[in-house]
Amino acid sequence: MKLYSFFNSSTSYRVRIALALKGLPYDYQGVNLREGQQYSPAHRTLSPIGGVPVLEVDGAVLSQSLAIIDYLDGQYPAPGLIPVDARQRARVLEIANLIGCDIHPVNNVRVLNYLQNVLAVSAEQKTAWYRHWVAEGLSAVEALLQRHGSGNYCVGDEPGLAECCLIPQVANAERMGCDLSGYPRIMAVYRHCLQLPAFLAAAPARQTDFIA
């Protein structure tokens, strides 16, 4: 199993958490997004969109973090990351898709670079853009957690897909200086997960391609 990843990519971080939770060993291949390595012809053969993560497993090449995690959950079912119970499953997917579809796509490297390099927005405007969409999205996640009465985790008593998505998103929001004081449930889950071995192993600073 080989994972193409970038230490600071939140989508790669999701898959690293999933692999760690399942205790699955893998070879790590860094792809430097800051240098544009994701757009090389060789990498485009793995990821047509030119991104990370990519997982080579069982003779297949898989891209897109949620698809990869779903595959891992099907092939290596213990521990399960996506609940079997229909209502629990819907709640986990609700949170994962809110982060994966509503927050991340408008704030990833491709979009931020386009804003700055093509549309010529200022650094201040780019930061304001990032923080606006993080606030919109995390406010909705917080409302879901409050509605569901979450404890140490988003849904249920074990970490899973929702945490795989949430923890990297919060880590990036912290790095970008977002105000997270209005999300007590999110931050409680975040602080709890950061104490767990799988989340520590998957953290950006623990990766071989980490850049200080």
Image (spheres, rainbow, N blue to C red):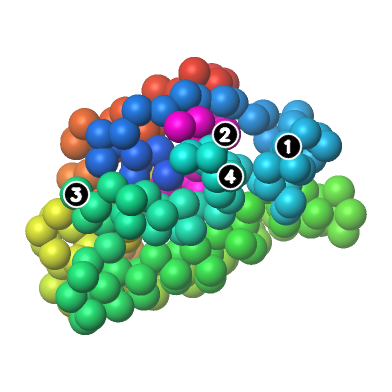
Query: Which residue was labeled with disc 1?
Result: 43
Q: Which mark is residue 79?
A: 3
N-terminal label among 2 and 3: 2
Task: Determine if residue 161 is in view.
Answer: yes
Q: CA distance from mark 1 to mark 4?
A: 11 Å
Pointer 2 and pointer 1: residues touching (CB < 8 Å)?
yes
What segment is highlighted magenta in the picture?
1-14
- What is the x, y in percent for residue 131? 55, 59
Would you say 156 lies left or right of 170 here? left
The residue at 49%/71% (across/down) is: 136
Query: Which residue was labeled with disc 4?
Result: 61
Q: Which mark is residue 4?
A: 2
Say what amino acid the circle numbered 1 marks.
Answer: His
- What is the x, y in percent for residue 117? 86, 48
Choose top left, top right, bottom left or bottom right for residue 1: top left
Number of numbered callouts drawn:
4
